[in-house]
Image: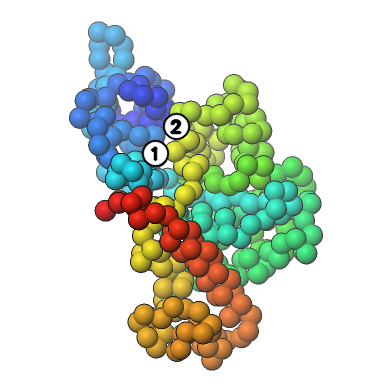
Amino acid sequence: MRARVYRSSGREFECKLQDTQELVSACALGNLLRGDNSVTVGDFVQVEKIVENNRYQIVSVEKRKSEIFRVIVRENKKKVTAANCDVVVILVSVSTPKFKRGIVDRFLLRAIAWEITPVIVFNKMDEHSKDLVDLVFERDRLQSLGVLCFEISAKVASYEKKYLTLGMDDLKSVLKDKTSVFLGQSGVGKSKTINALSGGKVNLFTGDIGKVGKGKHTTTWSEIVDCDEFLLIDSPGIRSFSIEDVAKDELLEYFPDLAGRATACKFTNCGHTENSKGCSFFDISNYSSEYEMELVLSRLDSFFRMQEEITNIPSWDKKIK
């Protein structure tokens, strides 16, 4: 029987049978509990019923279409914390906490590494003022990546979009029938946004996303939360966003919009700074307007900030290959 893993806690799994939609408890064969490909939340699996105790056993795991993972540097090991996710929702606040462009670019780096479609959601628009966040600029700087941007207010249901073409209804359409993971700083309104998207079908408490109906707490297990028209993956393994596992000479690969422009630089060892001879990034003739140049340079600034962070990590702490 085909099933999907909805919750993982040690060696125990809660699976939803795909034909009956019944949630059942299951254990797994020993070879499915070891290594990078051990059973994880989001996996589609084959289960068999154990007649003696009316439980199920996972006997095989289907090939994953995507993986959410992190590299444990000191152990030189990749740890997969969720599988088969369709969309990474990067949620940001336009008021409190203060919008930080660098955090958005850091989350985008992870979505690109995971090869999962990212979207940006600007929340708390009922408290927005243009001097805090220029939504049009933030949308335009990511256009070359094909990232969709939405403006919403999870708190004010009647809020209507003013700056972007996409709002709450559009976001619901994008997430419909998909499995999503929500990323964002503490306080950006993840739980309220999920509550609003579900149309009141679920009621997640504010604070860390936790088990429905269990009150505010920090989730220590991985699980799928059914939000009626879409599924949400919640996992403690995706809340740390150190980039210590990214090699300095590979960082540009996670900025595909910049990598393409870098090939136009005169020298292959270009430092991509304003003083670099023949650098395509600082040649206005390579742009249609000064505005386009400003958009690209804002991304280049994020690249250099991350590069500096990587450079400051001790070499002995980067043995990941």
Q: Secondary structure at mark 1?
A: strand
Residue 186 occupies which quadrant of the picture? top right
- Residue 253 location in percent, x, y? 38, 66
**Nearer to us in this view, 29 or 96:** 96
Task: Determine whether, in the image, residue 296 is placed left or right of residue 313.
Answer: right
Label ID, residue 320: none
**Nearer to us in this view, 193 or 79:** 79
Q: How is the image coloured?
A: rainbow
Q: Is residue 76 above or below residue 8?
A: below
* Labels 2 and 1 touching (C-beta < 8 A): yes
- Residue 247 location in percent, x, y? 36, 60
Residue drawn at x 27%, y 43% as measured from the top left: 63
Quarter of the image where the N terminus is located: top left
Total of numbered circles in the picture?
2
Task: Determine whether, in the image, residue 83 is placed left or right of residue 242.
Answer: left
Residue drawn at x 47%, y 49% as measured from the top left: 242
Q: Name which residue type carries label 1.
A: Thr
- Residue 75 location in percent, x, y? 30, 41
Q: Name which residue type carries label 2.
A: Ser
Is residue 174 visible in this depiction of the protein? no
- Residue 47 location in percent, x, y? 27, 26
To which residue does mark 2 refer? 222
Q: Secondary structure at mark 2?
A: strand
Residue 237 occupies which quadrant of the picture? top left
**Nearer to us in this view, 271 or 95:** 271
Task: Determine whether, in the image, residue 283 is placed left or right of residue 47.
Answer: right
Mark positioned earlier in the residue sequence (2 or 1) = 1
To which residue does mark 1 refer? 81
Mark 2 and mark 1: span between their CA atoms?
A: 8 Å
Residue drawn at x 55%, y 75% as measured from the top left: 296
